[in-house]
Image (cartoon, rainbow, N blue to C red):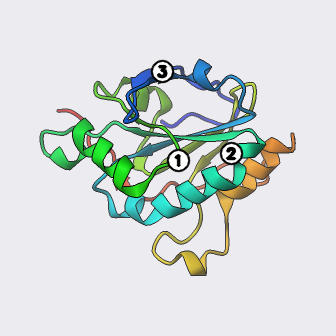
């Protein structure tokens, strides 16, 4: 089961495509932290990458950080390997950390089910929002509900999130057998 709103963010210590290792404490100065379970191969994630980059660009200076974590197994999905993650992050010019959860412990601790699956935490690292980025993965110009952006704005303003839970859509996380 995914974390429920109000839950404390599980910590992690994971390698990133930029050569660094990150934990939640790395982002202690951030007012809002979005942990996005992601990957390279999923068409839903690929469709959302520009929006993820845009969210980090728009809200990063206000105290927000987006952290993408790839936990997919790589035996059947070699395109999700760390080497391919490094290439994708460079090719797409990710402006956010892209982390590898090889043993899938972090994905399990969050109860992540999909890629992308969003977990937005406030400054106390309590879950303020979980679910989807918006209501139209295929056609960004037809989005009518910007759930994650709305939640980020609420958290940055110290207000409750109007819609704290939506249904995450995307590819299922590819678990180790």
Rendered residue at 41%/24% (across/down): 14
The mark lying in front, picked from 1 and 3, is 1
Marks 1 and 2: CB-CB under 8 Å? yes
Q: Give the CA distance from mark 3 to mark 2.
A: 21 Å
Residue highlighted by disc 1: 95
Residue identifier under label 2: 60
Residue drawn where x is 55% and y is 75% of the image: 140
Mark 1 or mark 3: whose residue is earlier in sequence: 3
Q: Which residue is mark 3?
A: 12
Residue for point 67% across, 75% down: 144
As helix, strand or loop, the secondary structure at mark 3 comes to: loop
Q: Residue furthest left?
A: 75
Residue 119 % position (x, y) = 58, 41
Across and down, in percent, residue 33 comes to: 64, 36
Most extreme residue toward the bottom is 142
Q: Earlier in the sequence, mark 3 or mark 2?
A: 3
Point 12% across, 39% down: residue: 75
Residue 40: where, in percent of width, then height?
31, 51
Label 1 vs 2, first from the N-terminus:
2
At label 1, counting other C-alpha atoms closer than 10 Å, the crowd grade (few under 14, some 14-19, many 20 or more) is some
Q: Position of residue 114 (x, y in %)?
A: 41, 49
- Neighbour tally class for label 2: few under 14, some 14-19, many 20 plus, Cα within 10 Å: some
Provide the secondary structure element on which disc 2 rests: helix
């Amino acid at each position: 089961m995914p974390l429920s709103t109000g839950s404390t963010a599980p910590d992690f210590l994971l390698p990133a495509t930029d050569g660094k290792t990150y934990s939640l404490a790395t982002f202690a100065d951030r007012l809002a932290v979005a942990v996005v379970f992601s990957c390279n191969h999923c068409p839903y994630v690929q469709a959302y990458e520009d929006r993820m980059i845009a969210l980090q660009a728009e809200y990063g200076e206000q105290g927000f950080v987006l952290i993408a974590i790839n936990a997919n197994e790589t035996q059947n999905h070699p395109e999700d390997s760390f080497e391919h993650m490094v290439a994708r992050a460079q090719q797409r010019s990710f402006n956010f950390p892209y982390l590898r959860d090889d043993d899938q412990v972090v994905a399990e601790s969050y109860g992540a089910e999909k890629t992308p699956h969003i977990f937005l935490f406030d400054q106390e690292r309590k879950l303020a929002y979980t679910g989807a980025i918006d209501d139209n993965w295929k056609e960004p110009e037809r989005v009518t509900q910007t759930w994650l952006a709305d939640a980020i704005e609420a958290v940055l303003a110290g207000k409750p999130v109007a819609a704290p839970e939506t249904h995450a859509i995307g590819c299922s996380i590819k678990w180790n057998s």
